[in-house]
Amino acid sequence: MTVRVGVLGATGAVGQRLIQLLDPHPEFEIAALTASESSAGKTYKEAAKWRVNSPIPEDVAGLEVHATDPESVPDDVDLIFSSLPSSVGAEVEPGFCEAGYVVSSNSSNGRMDEDVPLIIPEVNADHVDLLEVQRDERGWDGALLKNPNCSTITMVPPLAGLDREFNLTDVRVSTLQAVSGAGYSGVSSMEIIDNAIPHIGGEEQKMESESRKLLGSFDGAEVHLNEMDVAASCNRIPTLDGHLENVWADTAEDISTADAEAAMESVTGVDLPSSPEKLITVFEEPDRPQPRLDRNIDNGMGVAVGGFRETTDGVQFNCLAHNTMRGAAGASVLNGELLNKRGYL
Ligand SMILES: N[C@@H](CC=O)C(=O)O
């Protein structure tokens, strides 16, 4: 049965990607769009400055955009995708859940809340049942589930393979993040052309905390954070899409580069429409993965790894994923598919 879905923040960069992915989706049908007050009452085509590299879907172009409040969204919408600025998400998402809507959110508010599942389906799908605890505690008919930050999503699948086989103790990561991560008006051309910016506000803290939650264990009542120590340094570079990351991972057990590659490849896709079969592609060429060449791997939903070297206490590698697909809109859609499959809608 087709699931009727709504998109909050539909005119933004991630909102547009969501529409691109949801329009042809085999399980979902776009039924409601919301944006800021200034867009309410306009058609989507009038309200959105469409910047995605495929035409605006015809059946979406004429839909009316509503204000972002639960009263504006029809009751027969079963699932809401949210890509709101975090301050707005914090204000409105709980109201949607209280009104009975199930929300798959890309916004960063609430990701570390104890009763909010933070999910990458190929890594920790079992955490979704934290929603039972959330519903009990908050008295919601709806539910709130989050995907992680784009730079965290890039490194966690390969780390999951290492942790399962060899127990991670320390992770150090330095990122080279594309400008699309900051949105259309995030970084000006004068700031980023011929430059690199060694600061992305709040990003390091997100990588350090979210990765420990994703690789933590769920005992049916709460998620216990993984005990590994994570330190991140985040940098913006002038690529358009695709976050590249240099990772140093220390393990409790001895590990060779071949062991590391095999452990990562054991983290495969899951049985959901947007999950790639393979998930992690290992490159043997020392100069891969690269953003321009490899960000669209598995329709932008794969993770590419390479550049393996043994270190004193573990292994060093590079990883790359498409930040607005696997790292944002695609991640939310995948979580929506999980919610549907697990009967939460
Ligand atoms: N916070 C991230 C968003 C992901 O693309 C960034 O700034 O790059």
Image (cartoon, rainbow, N blue to C red):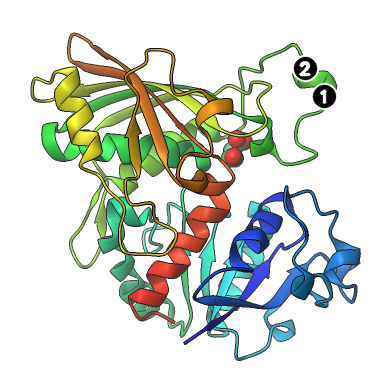
Mark number, residue 172? none
Label 1 – label 2 distance at C-alpha: 6 Å
Q: Is residue 108 at least partly visible in the picture?
A: no
Q: What residue is pinned by disc 2?
A: 193
Badge 1 marks a residue whose secondary structure is: helix
Q: Residue at x 38, y 56 (%)?
A: 119
Q: Position of residue 49 (x, y in %)?
A: 85, 54
Check disc 2 and give the amino acid type: Ile
Q: Residue at x 51, y 47 (%)?
A: 299
Q: Position of residue 62 (x, y in %)?
A: 84, 75
Circle 1 residues within 10 Å: few <14, some 14–19, many ≥20: few
Left or right: residue 115 versus residue 178 is left
Left or right: residue 240 versus residue 38 is left
Q: Position of residue 159 (x, y in %)?
A: 28, 35
Figure check: 2 above or below 143? below
The quarter of the image that holds ligand 1 is top right
Q: Is residue 209 at least partly visible in the picture?
A: yes
Q: Position of residue 88 (x, y in %)?
A: 69, 59
Near-viewer residue (287 or 325)? 287
Check disc 1 and give the amino acid type: Ser
Circle 2 residues within 10 Å: few <14, some 14–19, many ≥20: few
Figure check: 14 above or below 168? below
> Decide: marks 1, 2 in contact (CB < 8 A)?
yes
In the image, the residue with mark 2 has its CB under 8 Å from the nearest atom of ligand 1: no
Q: Residue at x 73, y 53 (%)?
A: 54
Badge 2 marks a residue whose secondary structure is: loop
Near-viewer residue (96 or 272)? 272
Q: What residue is pinned by disc 1?
A: 189
Quarter assignment of residue 285: top left
Figure check: 169 above or below 38? above
